[in-house]
Structure formats: C-alpha cells, structure tokens
Image (cartoon, helix red, strand yellow):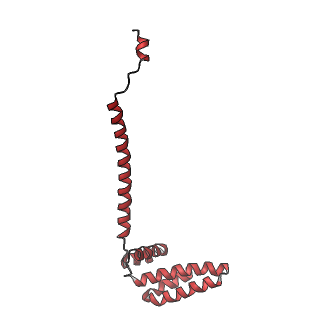
Amino acid sequence: MSRANMRKEKKPKDPVIIVLDVIIVLLIFVMIFVGAKTAFYKILANESSFSEDASMMAFELQQGDYAALIQDKYMNEFNGNTKPAAYHALADYVEASFLYKIYDTKGYTDRANEQKSVMEEARTNMKELEVFADKADRMFQ
C-alpha cells in the first residue's frame, strides 16, 4: 500500500471511546448544573439570614445614604426583623416623602394625600430621628 492510501483509510472509533466521551460530556453538564444550584441556594441562604442592626443603619444615616436605609428596612421586614423600629419609621418617611413629591408635582392629589398620611404616621414612630426627617424634607424640596 502506498502512503497516500494509508492516509485515506480511517479506522472506526472504538465504541468504548465513544461511550466514554458521552459520559464525560454528561458529567461536565451535571457539574455545571450542580454548581449553579449550589451557588443559587448559597446566595438565597445569605439573603434570608440578612438582618441590619441599628448601628449600621445609623452609619448609613451619617453618610446620608437614605436609599440604603430603605433597602435595609425592606430586607429586615422580609426576614421578620422589626427591631430598629425608629429607623424603619424614618425609612418609611423618606420613601413616602419622595413619593409625595412625585405625586404632588404630577397633580395626583389622592395619592399625594395617602403619602402625606404615611409621612405623618412615620414621623410619630421615629422618635429621636426626627432631625433626619427634617433633612429629608429639605432634600425633596
């Protein structure tokens, strides 16, 4: 046989090799799937145990980060933590103040009045944090 004829002839693949290739590909997909599920549940577990304490919320107020304060309030409520009630009331006040300004500007008086009542209720619950409510009022003027 000449050299040219040898190149053209292909040997059939061994069926064991084909089965092993399929098994390797399947194992790769299984590992990717299991890794994604593990990461998902790990993130879910971290978020479900999230609870922001009053000292961190006070730090956010000192930094003027009202958005983080509102986010922390919702995460605390999601996880059943209502401990820093004054901070939660302030977060409610800031959020309602923002929405009030939008509704008032757009002329939605009913919705604006609803937000005004939320603001009044929150102001009574925030106790010593009323200073920050005044800052929020100036911020949204």
Tally of numbered tags: 0
Can residue 141 be seen in the rendering of this structure? Answer: no
Residue located 43% across and 74% down the image: 72
Residue located 55% across and 83% down the image: 137
Residue located 47% across and 90% down the image: 124
Quarter of the N terminus within the rendering: top left
The extreme right residue here reads 107
Whether residue 18 is situated above or below residue 1 in the rendered picture: below
Can residue 90 be seen in the rendering of this structure? Answer: yes
Asked whether 65 or 19 is in front, the reply is 19
Question: In the drawing, does residue 27 fall left or right of residue 74?
Answer: left
Residue 28, image x, y percentages = 36, 44
Residue located 41% across and 74% down the image: 78
Whether residue 56 is situated above or below residue 3 in the rendered picture: below
Residue 35, image x, y percentages = 36, 53
Asked whether 57 or 33 is in front, the reply is 33
Image quadrant where residue 101 sits: bottom right
Residue 69, image x, y percentages = 45, 75
Asked whether 31 or 106 is in front, the reply is 31
